[in-house]
Image: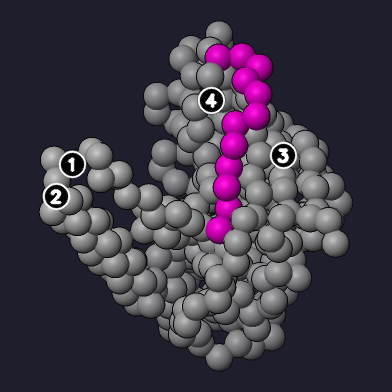
Amino acid sequence: MVIRAAPFAFLAAVIVLAGAQERNWVLSRELQPADVLAHFPLEVGNRWIYETKYLTGDPDRPHLNHWIWDVVVTKQSRTADGLIVFRKRRELRVLQGEPYDQSGLRADPYLITDGYIYELPSAFWGESDQVVGSDAFPNENAAAASRKWREESIRNGREDFMKRLRAGELEPAFFFPMRVRLMWGERQREDEDYQGWSTHHTQPDSFYHWVVTGQGGRSLCGCMSIPPTAFDVVYDTAGGPTEIFFQDGVGVIGEWNRHEGTYWEETTTLQQFIPAPR
């Protein structure tokens, strides 16, 4: 379970007279966490259909991969660390080239805890931990040894991951409630940001933070128009930006990535959200 600092009221804009710095941002650790499922509908059976265009090669004459895919929530599991949401992804139709996905829109399980969503490695939290059949081994002893090795590998992987998460070393994928100028990152990073502001009025560096830059209007990438109530969330790195568009009650309605070195660019848009039958 994530350990949080005591929340205080959101500061829309605080003028610090010493240095006359304006604060128009807030860290996730400063807010009261919300019920994630009230914002992101991750109930079993809910389905999202996406379209992805992936460009590579010469930016002026790029090679295009273009396909349709979906993701569906298959199961929820309550644990001591929070609610795990299992998802399954399928490629539905290739329109050009082949599927080649660089985005974060994969189907790793989600861990929901204290207003945050973390992505769990599928290698350790796959919904079905398949073991190679006994006919692939020379004898039952070899098959049993393989199963034991896999079980230990999964257990150790889970323990190591959760140890890092509890220590504040891992970055959440989402935090709720979202609002404009919200920033979030690893808890250790946020602690440093908070200390820097408290002691020296140092503004956090937006690099390697998720930042809710606005709501509605035109996206940073210029690749889509954002509905008035949707949030524009940007993550900047030296390698290039990632931009996610999130709609309360729907989920991720789009994502854009661009690499600043060897060129590639990916744009994903939601085609349809299909709630599970009630």
Picture coordinates of residue 273, whole percent (x, y): 79, 46
| Residue 141 shows up from this direction | yes
**Based on the displayed image, in which of its 4 quarters is residue 32 positioned?**
bottom right
Marks 4/2: CA distance?
A: 36 Å
Q: Which of the two discs, 3 and 4, labels the residue nearer the N terminus? A: 3
Q: Which of the two discs, 3 and 1, labels the residue nearer the N terminus? A: 3
Taking the image as shown, residue 228 lies to the left or right of residue 4, namely right
Instruction: Inspect the magenta stretch and tell me whether residue 93 lies in it.
Output: yes
- Residue bearing mark 4: 99
Say if 121 sits above or below 138 in the image: below
Q: Residue at x 55, y 71 (%)?
A: 77
Marks 1/2: CA distance?
A: 6 Å
Q: Which of the two discs, 3 and 2, labels the residue nearer the N terminus? A: 3
- Residue bearing mark 2: 142
Asked which secondary structure carries label 2, the reply is helix
What span is in magenta?
86-97
